[in-house]
Amino acid sequence: MSEPLIVFPAIDLKGGQVVRLAEGDMDRATVYGSDPAAQARAFAEAGATHLHVVDLDGAFAGHAVNAAVVESIVAAFPGKVQLGGGIRDRAAVDRWLGLGVDRVVIGTAALDHPDFVREAARDLPGRIVVAVDARDGFVATQGWADVSEVRVVDLAAQFADAGVAALLFTDVGRDGLLKGCNVEATQALAHATSIPVIASGGVAGIEDIEALMIARSGIVEGGIEGVITGRALYDGRLDLAQALKVARG
């Protein structure tokens, strides 16, 4: 692969603040800042060209909750913003893309209403990302509060020919715990689908970026497009500038 691995610093929003959850548990939130727009600018100054934003309250409510904060982030960040959390109908998709979001991430609705996602991906090529959140190989939904009986690879297969921009694969059991990215499962999903895969959950340091660079080298189609990292950046375990350098190969 000649394209760099995209490093997406994450800004997760709860009550208008920058937080990180442990295993997607809203009761296990660590607050890292009260000015998300300033955090977005700081990531840009460190060299980030992409940003991953999640409206955590929205993911549980099923509709946008931190909308004004997201808009401030989009205005502050000069690169591309990818947004997830509570985006479950076409009106929400169109609204966010109209407000300058580059790509929207759809999770729960991808399992519950796959036709809506396929139609949106067909109408908006390159703008729809499907979140494939997993616990022990099965898809988790409703802000990770529920675990379905659908296997990750089967959900991915539903969107194989839909024009989906990427699959965002998160190992929920590792998210926010600094246990290390599940590189093996990410690589397996990338091999099983022609859709590019974004790794997420558990990134602990530069070793995870290096491991993903190795893992993506043998994948011909689709492959591993990027990696999302949050807590490791906020805790100082991962230097963003160094991560971006490694990701460029």
Image (spheres, rainbow, N blue to C red):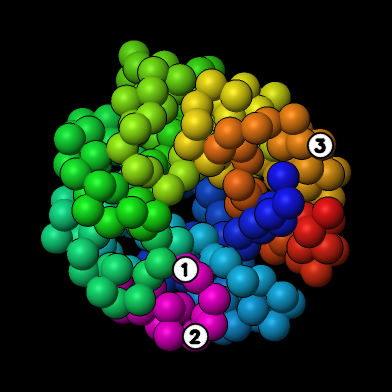
Q: Which residue is drawn at 53% across and 49% down?
A: 21
Left-right relation of 118 to 43: left
Q: Eyeballing the image, is 244 above or below 75?
A: above
What type of secondary structure mainly makes up the magenta span? helix
Identify the image quadrant of the C terminus: bottom right
Q: Nearer the viewer, residue 245 or 218?
A: 218
Left-right relation of 43 to 94: right
Residues in magenta, as a range: 67-81
Q: Quadrant of residue 82?
A: bottom left
> Can residue 72 be found in the magenta stretch?
yes
Q: Number of callouts in the render? A: 3
Q: Residue at x 44, y 22 (%)?
A: 152
Identify the image quadrant of the N terminus: top right
Q: Residue at x 50, y 27 (%)?
A: 193
- Residue 242 location in percent, x, y? 85, 63
Left-right relation of 24 to 71: right
Checking the image for residue 76, the label placed there is 2
Label 3: which secondary element: helix
Q: In which quarter of the image is residue 141?
A: top left
Say which label, 3 or 1, has the lower sequence index.
1
Neighbourhood count class around disc 1 (C-alpha, 10 Å): few under 14, some 14–19, many 20 upward: many
Q: Do the residues labelled 2 and 1 touch (CB within 8 Å)?
A: no
> Can residue 172 be found in the magenta stretch?
no
The residue carrying mark 1 is 81
Q: How far apart are marks 3 and 2 (CA)?
A: 33 Å
The residue carrying mark 3 is 214
Say which label, 3 or 2, has the lower sequence index.
2
* Three-letter amino acid code at the position of disc 1: Val
Q: Which of 155 and 18 is in front in this view?
A: 155
Q: Distance between the residues labelled 2 and 1?
A: 10 Å
Neighbourhood count class around disc 3 (C-alpha, 10 Å): few under 14, some 14–19, many 20 upward: few
